Amino acid sequence: MKQRIVNILILITLTLLAPNILSAQNKFFSTPDRGGLDGAKSQAILQMLMNENAIRRDETAANAASITQDRAAAEVSITALKNATDASLTVIGDCGTQGMIFGPGHTLVDGNDCIPSLQVNNDGRVSFQAGITFGAYEVCNPATAGTMRYNASAKRMEFCNGDVWGMLGGNTGCSINFPTISDADLDTFYNTTDAVYSGSDATASVAGATAATVRRNGANTGMSSGVAISQGNSVGIRGRSASLFNQTATFTLDIGAYTACWQITTRQQDVTPNAFNFSNLSAQELDTLVSSNGVTISGFEGPLNVSVGGQGSPELKVDSGPWTSSAQIEPGQSVQLRMTTANAFATSYVASVSIGTYTTSWTVTTKQDMLYGGAHSPDDCTLAFGVVDNTTGVSVCRFNRGGANTACPTGWTHYQNWSETANQNSGGVACGTSNVGLAPNTSNCNTGGHAWGNIAQETCTFNYCTCHGCGCCNNRTAYAQVMISLCY
């Protein structure tokens, strides 16, 4: 019942409002054809708005498409940039991991664009593959302690100990090191370069391997201790070099708590004398002590050691000194050698002599082996087409002569007639044989013969007759034919 009452009230309300609603609708949607000016204007405005809305909708769609494309391109660029950055960071990280500097484009980079010239090792050490150049730095105080610099004027590396600059690599315990002096003359005084003292007032003293005094403000004090030094004074050392070659004299200058060190090294000794030689000897007797000529040695700085060695137990002596295998020699002194010759013919012994860096030799040769009499050598025998023979107990030359020609060659002396012989028959007939007209008659005699040896010449005796009877006959000796002669 209640619902029906509500529905009736709604219907009555709509009936009363219907004329007003229709009038408003005609005004808003009126057109010229429909007979409303205001409606036509409204319709035109609405259409214009709808067209503008369509244009803006198309622009929005185009912008959205463009934005989508630009976003895609941007994402590609960003991705490429990210990849390149990641790669670069990886390479940079690799250089850093190796303790190197990242330096693309540098002339010394490796394949990873790392510069290997400087590298920090895992233990903290820094390696410089191509060396390192230090510049100059002026301040040395507690704040700069541990600083190194290159002093161009002194041409040295220096180290700051928190108070003063000292030569790097100097003696242990030295606050500073004066520049060393090298190639110094022997037993000669030298001065250090001066250093400015920056500490509090103190007393200076110097000690060294040789005589030394303290220098102050550029002058020699002549004192080795008790020298007053004030801040700002220049200090140094005057010291004497060693009296031997290639020796280093070390000095220390103590001022309060500071120690300055200095060294003087004498020059190298000239150990090469002028060239010299000994006269070689030849045709010397066997197993005999012989001496050389004396040679004066010069052109070096003494003393030097002189020594001899070699065959024949060689010895030397300097001037009138004793015979020995080694000795000391000064410039201007002389050396003589001696040795025992070989115990064989035509044999050379060599002695080697050394003084400093120079070495020479002396040669002694024994005489050739000579034949008996000493007039000819074995070589002479060979050249004369003979053969050296010692069968007789002496050396002679054996010649194949033969027949009646037993003479030696010209210039040679006959040693013995007996030698190798050939059988000789005297010929003839028996004694007493009637052989008228054939006198004298001889009997047969055969000497025999032998090969070469130290044997007397064979002989035989035959009967020699001057008539046909036997009262006129006597015995004679026949000699075998000589085939070889010995000569000297």
Image: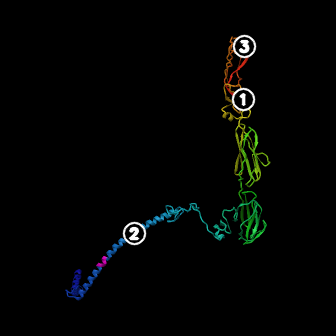
Q: What quarter of the picture does the C terminus occupy? A: top right
Q: Does residue 406 show up magenta in the picture?
A: no
- Which corner quadrant of the image does residue 186 belong to? bottom right
What whole-number distance in Å separates the C-alpha atoms at marks 3 and 1?
A: 39 Å
Q: What quarter of the picture does the N terminus occupy? A: bottom left
Q: Which segment is the magenta one?
A: 54-58
Q: Nearer the viewer, residue 143 or 182?
A: 182
What whole-number distance in Å separates the C-alpha atoms at marks 2 and 3?
A: 163 Å
Q: Nearer the viewer, mark 3 or mark 1?
A: 3
Task: Tell me the residue that label 2 is attached to.
Answer: 75
Looking at the image, residue 44 lies above or below residue 113:
below
Amino acid marked by disc 3: Cys
* Disc sitting over residue 467 in the figure: 3
* Most distant residue in the right direction: 320
Q: Earlier in the sequence, mark 1 or mark 2?
A: 2
The colour mode here is: rainbow
Task: Tell me the residue that label 1 is attached to.
Answer: 414
Q: Earlier in the sequence, mark 2 or mark 3?
A: 2
Amino acid marked by disc 2: Glu
Instruction: Report x, y in % for residue 226.
Output: 78, 67
Looking at the image, residue 321 lies above or below residue 31:
above
Label 3: element kind: loop
Label 2: element kind: helix
* Residues marked 2 and 3 touching at CB (< 8 Å): no
* Most distant residue in the front direction: 437
Label 1: element kind: strand
Say whether residue 195 is left or right of residue 32: right
Q: Residues within 10 Å of mark 2 (few under 14, many from 20)?
A: few
- Which corner quadrant of the image does residue 363 belong to? top right
